[in-house]
Image: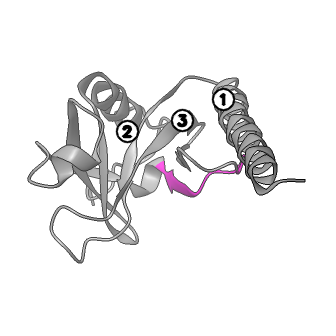
Amino acid sequence: MPVWQWLLDAAGVLLVLVLLYGLALVVRRRVIARDGGTFELSHRVRSDRAGRGWLLGIGRYSGEQLEWFRIFSLSPRAKRCWQRTELTYEERRAPEGPEQSALFPDHVVIVCRSDDGIVELAMGTSSLTGFQSWLEARPPGAEMPGSR
C-alpha cells in the first residue's frame, strides 16, 4: 500500500475523531442544560499575570450552588462549585487588555469574595442580573456574608 494511502487513511481517522469530539461536546452541553438553564461563564484560575488565566466555561445554578464546567472538557462533572452562602459580590469592571480577547464578547468581569479568597468571573450583563438575584435570594433566615 502506497504511503499516500496511509496518509489519506490517517487523515480520515483524524477527521472522524474530531467530529466525534465535537458531537460529544454538543451532547454534554445538552445533558448539563437539561436540569436548568446554562449561561456562558468564564473563570479566572490564575491571577499571577495581569489579564491572564481565564478559562471559558458554562455556568449552571443547582440549588444553593453555582457550578462551573469547562467549555471544551468532556467531563459531565462540574470543575468548580461555589456555595451561595459563601459568595459575596464585590465589584464589576470591563475586561482590560488581554482579557478582551480571552473572554466572550460583551462580557463583564465581576469580583466576588468567598471563604477561599477572591473569585473572578466573567459573564454577560443579563447573566450578571440573574447572578445578583440568585445571590440575594437566600433562604429565609440565612445571613448575608459580611452582615455580622
Three-letter amino acid code at the position of disc 1: Val
- The residue lying furthest to the front in this view is 2
Three-letter amino acid code at the position of disc 2: Leu
- The residue lying furthest to the bottom in this view is 48
Contact between labelled residues 3 and 2, with CB atoms less than 8 Å apart: no
Give the magenta-colored segment's residue range.
75-83
Q: CA distance from mark 2 to mark 1?
A: 29 Å
Q: Describe the element under mark 2 as helix, strand or loop.
A: helix
Q: Describe the element under mark 3 as helix, strand or loop.
A: strand
The residue lying at 60 percent from left, 37 percent from top is 63
Q: In the depicted view, which residue is nearer to us: 69 or 5?
A: 5
Q: How many marks?
A: 3
Q: Does residue 78 belong to the magenta stretch? A: yes
Query: Is 27 displayed left or right of 56 in the figure?
Result: right
Q: In the depicted view, which residue is nearer to us: 86 or 123?
A: 123
The spot of residue 48 in percent (x, y) is 24, 77
Q: CA distance from mark 2 to mark 3?
A: 11 Å
The spot of residue 126 in percent (x, y) is 29, 22
Q: Describe the element under mark 1 as helix, strand or loop.
A: helix
Q: Which quarter shows the C terminus? A: bottom left
The residue lying at 11 percent from left, 42 percent from top is 94
Q: Earlier in the sequence, mark 2 or mark 1?
A: 1
Query: Is 123 displayed left or right of 85 in the figure?
Result: left
Mark 1 closeness class: few <14, some 14–19, many ≥20 residues within 10 Å: few
- Check disc 1 and report the residue beneath it: 26
- Check disc 2 and report the residue beneath it: 135
- Check disc 3 and report the residue beneath it: 61
